[in-house]
Image: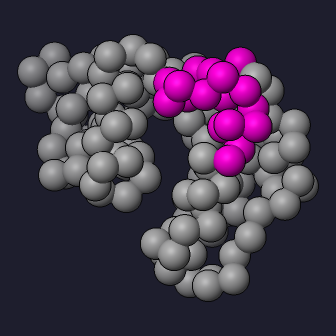
Amino acid sequence: MNSADPALPLSEYAFPGPLRDRLVAALLDGSKTSTSSLLSEYRENEPLPKVGERAVVVDSAGQPVAVETVTRVEIHALSDVPLDHALAEGEGFGTVREWRHAHEGFWHSQEFREALGDPGFHVTDETEIVCVRMSIQAL
C-alpha cells in the first residue's frame, strides 16, 4: 500500500507534537500494539472501536503514516487495567503503576482538560478505560 485509503477514518494519537511523534514511532517500529482512551471520550464524540475496523494513523504534520486494524477492545476500570495492556503500549512501561502515572499526566494536563472543556477533570480508580489492541501496516 503506497497511500492511505481516503475512505478510512483518521487515527490521531495524543496531540500533535513530541508525544504524538514518540507514539507514532513506536507504532511504526512495532513496539506499540495497544492504546488507551477514556470511555467518556467515546460516548461524547464517537462510537467505540470494533474488532476489524481500520483507520489511517497520521503524524504530527497530519500526514498518513500507517493503517491500523483493531484486533481487540476491552473496557476496564482504571484500577484494573492489565499488565499485558500496559506493556503493549510500547512506551517502556514495566508496571501498570508506571503506565497509570504517565496516562494520568496526560489526562490531567491542561491541554487535555481544555480539549474536554473541563478544567477540573480528574480520573479515579473507577474511571472506565477503553483498552484497544491493534495491528499496524506502515504506508
Q: Is residue 113 left or right of residue 128?
A: left
Is 58 a magenta residue? no
Report whether residue 92 is seen: yes
Report whether residue 70 is seen: no
Quadrant in the picture for residue 3: top left
Q: Is residue 15 above or below residue 23?
A: below
Name the residue located 28 percent from the left edge and 55 percent from the top edge.
17
Looking at the rendered image, the quarter that the N terminus falls into is: top left
Name the residue located 29 percent from the left edge and 56 percent from the top edge.
16
Q: Is residue 125 left or right of residue 39?
A: right
Q: Nearer the viewer, residue 55 or 94?
A: 94
Q: Nearer the viewer, residue 33 or 47?
A: 33
Looking at the rendered image, the quarter that the C terminus falls into is: top left
Name the residue located 68 percent from the left edge and 47 percent from the top edge.
101
Quadrant in the picture for residue 23: top left
Q: Give x and y (percent) for residue 116.
A: 56, 75
Look at the magenta stretch and give its main secondary structure. helix
Q: Nearer the viewer, residue 76 or 31?
A: 31
- Which stretch appears magenta? 84-101
Is 100 a magenta residue? yes
